[in-house]
Image (spheres, rainbow, N blue to C red):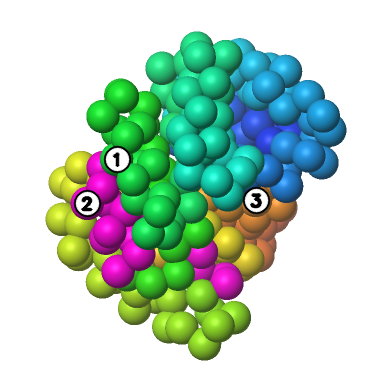
Amino acid sequence: MKVFLDSARLGEIDSALCRRCVAGVTTNPTFLVEEAGGRPLAHLRRAVELLRPHHLPLCVQVMTTVPAEMVRQAEAINDALGYGDLVVKVPCGWEELEVIAKLHRRGIAVNGTACMTATQALMAAAAGARYVTLFYGKMSDAGIDAGDVVEDVARALGGPAATCELVVASIRRTYDVHECLRRGAHVATVGFRLLSGLCEHPKTVEAVRGFAASFVPLDV
């Protein structure tokens, strides 16, 4: 399973890339408003320049609920950024399936996002999505067994060899990442605050302190 960074903050993106600990970046309209105000494309261009040397996917969501406008926006974002690893996020819905299909035919990679059920994810994949995203935390809020849904979708998509990858977002605890790994998700996208927790443990600190206490300078 891969880990993506869920953020539009350039400093967070740069910090994660320096550590080579993420395999992509996801953003959403809320993040972009907070970071870029009224200039989202200018901000996204700066994110692209950070990602370009690494050839990692950048997921950017359309900022409208009108299907025809979704297509126009997706094409405009694709043209403006000129980034071959761009993925356009389109929320899943009946009308939106046509948007996913159109963008797929035009060679624009799509992430069918905001899925809360297995059937939503599978319909988006059938329409041509390169990724489908389940909102783990929001599913749990609605009383859905999110882990079971992740497992069902991962299996239905074809496991590790799937051409459409399952992304799990809305992750609130580091343990949720382990659960996504156990259930077969292809990607977990997490906020920057969780990244350090994925590579730290109190027992690791305890062990290292013990080694340090026993250390004798090398006789060289």
Residue occupying image coordinates x 43% and y 76%:
146
What amino acid is at disc 2?
Ala
Q: Is residue 103 visible?
A: yes
- Crowding around mark 2 (Cα neighbors within 10 Å: few <14, some 14 to 19, many 20+) is some
The residue identified by callout 3 is: 191
- Vertical position of residue 137 compared to residue 106: above or below: below
Query: Mark 1 against mark 3, which lies toward the viewer?
Result: 1
The dot on residue 50 is none
Of mark 2 and mark 1, the one earlier in the sequence is 1
Magenta-span inclusion, residue 175: no
Left or right: residue 160 versus residue 140 is left
The dot on residue 126 is 2
- Crowding around mark 3 (Cα neighbors within 10 Å: few <14, some 14 to 19, many 20+) is some
Which residue occupies the extreme bottom position in the image?
A: 143
Q: Which residues are magenta?
A: 119-138
State the SS at label 3: loop
State the SS at label 1: helix
Q: Position of residue 89 (x, y in %)?
A: 49, 42
